[in-house]
Amino acid sequence: MMMEQLLLSRASAASAASILEARSVAIVGASADPTKIAGRPLAYMLSRRFKGKLFPVNPKREEVQGLKSYPSLSAIGEPVDLAIVGTPASLVEGVIQEGINAGVKGFVVFSSGFSETGADGAALQQRLARLARDHGVTILGPNCLGVANSSTGLIASFTTALEETPMRSGNFAFVSQSGALGAYWMDICLRAGLGFSKWITTGNECDLDAAAAIAYLADDPETRVIGVYIEDIRDAAAFRAALKRAAAAGKPVLAIKAGRSSAGAAAAASHTGALTGDDALYDACLRQHGALRVDSLSSMIDIARLYLFDSVPQGNRVAIMSVSGGAGVLIADESEHWKLELPDFSPATHEALGQALPSFVSAANPLDLTGNVVQNTRSISLALETVATDPGNDVIVLFVGLMHSIASAFTEALSRVREKVNRPIIVIWIGAKEESLAELEQASIPVFRDIPPAMAALGQSLRLSDLRERALTLPEARGDADAPVESGSEASPTVCLSEWHGKELLRGLGVGMIPKGVLVDMDKAVGGLPGPLSYPVVAKLQADDLLHKSDIGGVILHIGDDEQLAGAIATLKQVAGGRQVRAHGILLESMQAFDQELLLGLRRDARFGPTLTLGRGGVEVELDADVVTRLLPLREHHIEDMLNSLRSARLLQGFRGGKPVDISTVSAHIARLCEIFLTHPDLTEIEINPLAVSGGNAWILDAVVRKFS
């Protein structure tokens, strides 16, 4: 294990609380200039009326920004919850040690010059991590932009997002490994009028990390929605537990994961690691633990707005109302893209709309209100109330364009209906005035300025709700069996078995999907087909580390008699000699009839632990990879979901008269193999390609097994 992993902190939700709920704060090196980094936190907290005590620490001044200044932390003479440190990196360790001696429990370190600068900085950062662990204190950073708590006015940060914008309380929280991205998020939220509850930038994470921050927010009564920006996860088990904790608390997590790197060639003995890649594992971690991955801060905030305004529907049935027929069609197109249904209105709704609207208006979904609303504003309210009470829809999407002269009619009607009917209403208003937007959002009606972001937010919010529900069905991790393993290192070398030895190992562990086979000596004459085999058979050259036998002509199929068998063995001997393969035999194996081919990969990732990859198998797997990856452990129904999520799932389901696969039974076979893999930590990788399936039967036709030596 690397030193950084050995010094992983034990930071927890309680650790985060010790910083975010601090009631007394010392600012080390506090500046009298409120525009400087060391002056901003004090200036911000004074102007936002921090509900606690502030202690500037500056030995060169008796007073800083109107407050008494102290020469050192120990000179304060009373308990201090939090110390903000912005000194040069070389002084940070001494400041923290002094603070520990003075009883300070938490530190926010702005200073840079640590692991981001190289080996010397990394060593210095490790010493900070050791201080945190040895003394039971919490350190946020170093190289971070700090934290903020809107309810107490705590602003242990020098972010420029608060230069001119007032701080506003809200129920949206953000955890960011990037200070700059955190500042952008804060600025967008404050300008959008959403506000925030807690804001946490973790920087280099020598102690308090994103996982501990998320766990804290999962329990925070002031937080309803959690946003996350991550670049890396140091402790995958803690991160997974934090996401699941948020899902159990009913709090949606919206995550941006930067970096979509591919796994290197050494990531796996076979192709599974290269096919999945690092990014797929992060994606799996987020998805299966209830977090929705988004691509931008604006998308994150759009989706969060629906949750914050209690406007996420219970289902996907959408009623579209529009003052423009064209806009209604565009919304319908976007609805189809996001798998949203447009049900017809009920007969009662048809009749009521016929009475409320002109005769030339068709009472269909989408409903075109037409420009007639300009001269008959009462029709807006009547139509809205009618559609809102139709039990056949889950959410109303109303499109408005311009119409400033009757803006008040729209806002009044929407506010009244939202108050009377417990049905989400989403408004798309192109060209709306700011006062109209403010009125609607005051009534908890989310407003969007264009069609695509509105419908994307709606579709994504439903997807997130589904992810959160599924996350609660995940089995609990089981300690060592699910732990990450640094395979392939000097401390834990691995060996790759030949197909024969790998299959024999699996057979001995109780895997029952292996065809009958016999290993024959290449140098001994084979007079006929060995028992218990019968024709047809396949002959395969066997050698350790020979991963792709067919690429060198090491596989001969459809051998139907003794003469063909003798010829196949002779050919394989020539292949071994010509390719200088150190073969230890030829595997003769029964041919199996099947309908579909799958790829199955099990491996232990150094960060995430055991993983399962399923996909379309066969020789085309690298040409057009159709795979999905999840972290173990999983239940059978999760494996069914994986198979059904493949692009090729329709082939498994019986496309165009083809024979369908019994996905439930095949998933049970795969689940059994996963269980064997989990309970035998000496196995580091199993790749099966193909896993041949027919009905509910499955056969391992080729396998690569890697284990600790």
Image (spheres, rainbow, N blue to C red):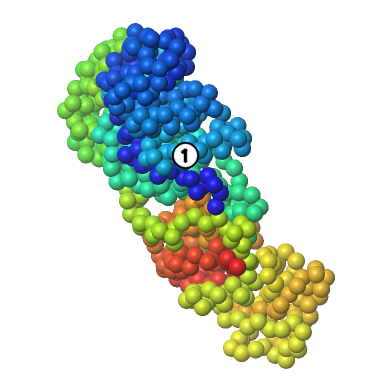
Disc tally is: 1
Q: Residues within 10 Å of mark 1 (few under 14, many from 20)?
A: many
Which residue is depicted at the point 52% across and 36% down? 125
| Residue 319 found in image quarter | top left
Q: Nearer the viewer, residue 14 or 442?
A: 14
> Farthest residue in the right direction?
578
* 133 vs 622: above or below: above
| Residue 703 found in image quarter | bottom right
Residue kind at label 1, given as amino acid type: Ala
Percent position of residue 521, x then y? 71, 84
| Residue 636 found in image quarter | bottom left
* 81 vs 703: above or below: above
Residue 628 visible within the image: no
Which residue is depicted at the point 16% across and 28% down? 420
Q: Nearer the viewer, residue 449 or 62?
A: 62
Taking the image as shown, residue 271 lies to the left or right of residue 126, namely right
Which residue is depicted at the point 33% across and 21% down? 76
Percent position of residue 72, x then y? 40, 21
Residue 635 visible within the image: yes
Q: Nearer the viewer, residue 538 or 122?
A: 122
Q: Nearer the viewer, residue 162 or 141?
A: 141
> Farthest residue in the left direction?
420
Which residue is depicted at the point 70% across and 90% down? 528
The quarter of the image holding the C terminus is bottom right
Q: Which residue is mark 1?
A: 129
Percent position of residue 265, x then y? 66, 52
Percent position of residue 458, x then y? 36, 34
The secondary structure type at the circle numbered 1 is: helix
